[in-house]
Image (cartoon, rainbow, N blue to C red):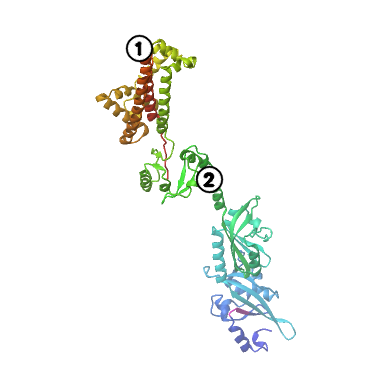
Amino acid sequence: MATLRNQSVDIGRLRQIIAGLSEGVILADDGGAILWANDAALRMHGVAEVEALGDNVTGYAKRFQLRYRNNHILGKKDYPLARVIAGEEFSEVIVEVTPAADDDAGWLHQVRSLALSDEKGKPDLFVLVMQDVSLRFEAEQRFEQTFNVNPAPALICRLADHRYVKVNQGFLDMTGFTRDEVLGQSLYDIDVLQDAADLDTAKERLREGRTIPPMQADLSLPDGGRKLVIVAGQPIELDEQPCMLFSFADLEPRRQAENQLRASEERFVKTFRLAPVGMIITTQDDHCLCDVNDAFCQLTDHSADEVTGQALATIKLWEPASFLKEAGSVLAERSGFRGRDVRVAGAHDRFDGLVHGLTIWGLTSILTVYLITSAVGGIIGGAFRTVGGVASTAGQSVGAAAPVIARAASVDDIDIGNEAAAYLTSVPADPAAMSPQEAQKEVARQLPDLAAGGTKGAQAESRIVAIVAAQQRISAAEARQKVEAAKARFVAAKNDAVETAKTTVDTAAGGAAGTSFLVVLALIIGAASAGFGGIVGGRREQIVVRQ
């Protein structure tokens, strides 16, 4: 057969059938001559006439260069047209077609072969059927590029056999796998759904090729470790095969942060509980107590159950109460403050305790004087070694009697001198710069002037008030109130002692009575010194407040 026109086939109807196809069709005879091509085939080669394709396979090879997608250039015998004329059957062959005269133009053809036989069964007409898949492969190429550069970890699993066909660098970086360790492996070898939160749903959706919703899972790593992730699946087609695109979000940094936060909270709670200073945690708006530590409970005598949940204003913690408002204003302006001294209301105050103690001490001292100046002292004898000394010094001057009394009480007069000298040592002029011991000594030095009254007494009282205010860090008015109250109690105690001394003088020997009276006065002066020392050295609670 030389040409198609010699065949008994109705050429007109044959052309009508293939002319309307979207696929390109090229007909060739067994000699290799190109007989005809439809419009789709011509468009896929960028020509308008059949002659532009070439007369035969050789002419076609001169006009068009073909290569596989891996850039391997085909020889003339490997051209699909040559292969179909040689009687080879093939399908789904992808070739890149480029005109020899224009390297910028090009198409991707998916080609299959077809051979038609005559009445005797001998192939005499060969058909090359092609599809232009350029757009599809361009889209796949864009997807490939996007998939590879996407930092979000991703895998593509072929649904037919559940094997991984693509993996991006994000997944390799997240897990530590290499590309060769992943590609070709099955879902069962690298189980990305391991310990998924809803494993049954994930398996069902995978089996049906449906979207797998995001869920938490634990990935096994090549080093034996595990990584917490969020995994989701989206069905796609790749190379016309149904696949599942798995994407991941790495939750391991969040899990590590949560563990670190939990450990930090535990350390904070332990530090808070065991802190040696009182600490509380409150809300910022209404200052409601959230938690207190043990040191706070010991400081305020409040239990944790008693104050937790209450507002600071309700339990009246501070003295003065205005401190809470002042602290709130400061915290509204900046993140915190420190070093603010404030008294805790209800806490034990050493000044008040010493005043009560001095009252009992004064009464005890008066009773002791009474015993010394009465016949009861003679009965007690050795129990009070000062009795003999007092009796033996009856009628002597006070200066001569003091050493005798001291020795009778086993107190060396040199020690008394040393102690007195200590109180006469210089102290800072500024009360705020004094230590508690220096403050006590300064108060003791001011007592004689205070007792004398007049101008010196007023100056001594002002000095004592200044020392009390500076040492206790209270206002001058509050300090003066404390000093006046102490003076009133001391005067009352002295008056009681004087009355008792007068009674003693009336009933005892003249010299012994006078000496006893001096002892009572000495005890009263000692009580005054101890009392004012207690004011100065009274405990001050420093509360450091932080936001």
Give the residue displayed 39% in from the left and 21% down from the top: 523
Amino acid type at image mark 1: Gly
User: The N terminus lies in which quarter of the figure?
Assistant: bottom right
* Image x and y of residue 308, in percent: 48, 48
Give the residue displayed 61% in from the left and 85% down from the top: 17
Identify which residue, 443 or 366, lies in the foreground. 366
Q: Which residue appears farthest toward the right when viewing the image? A: 120
Amino acid type at image mark 2: Ser
Mark 1 vs mark 2, CA separation in Å: 71 Å
User: The C terminus lies in which quarter of the figure?
Assistant: top left
Q: Secondary structure at mark 1?
A: helix
* Image x and y of residue 32, in percent: 66, 77
| Quadrant position of residue 150 | bottom right
For mark 1, what is the residue? 399
Residue 429 within the magenta-colored segment of the rendering: no
- Residue 545's disc is none
Give above or below for 207 relative to 168.
below
Identify the main secondary structure in magenta.
strand
For mark 2, what is the residue? 264
Give above or below for 152 relative to 223.
below
The answer to whether residue 479 is left or right of residue 248 is left
Residue 23 within the magenta-colored segment of the rendering: yes
Q: Secondary structure at mark 2?
A: helix
The answer to whether residue 165 is left or right of residue 543 is right
Give the residue displayed 60% in from the left and 74% down from the top: 60
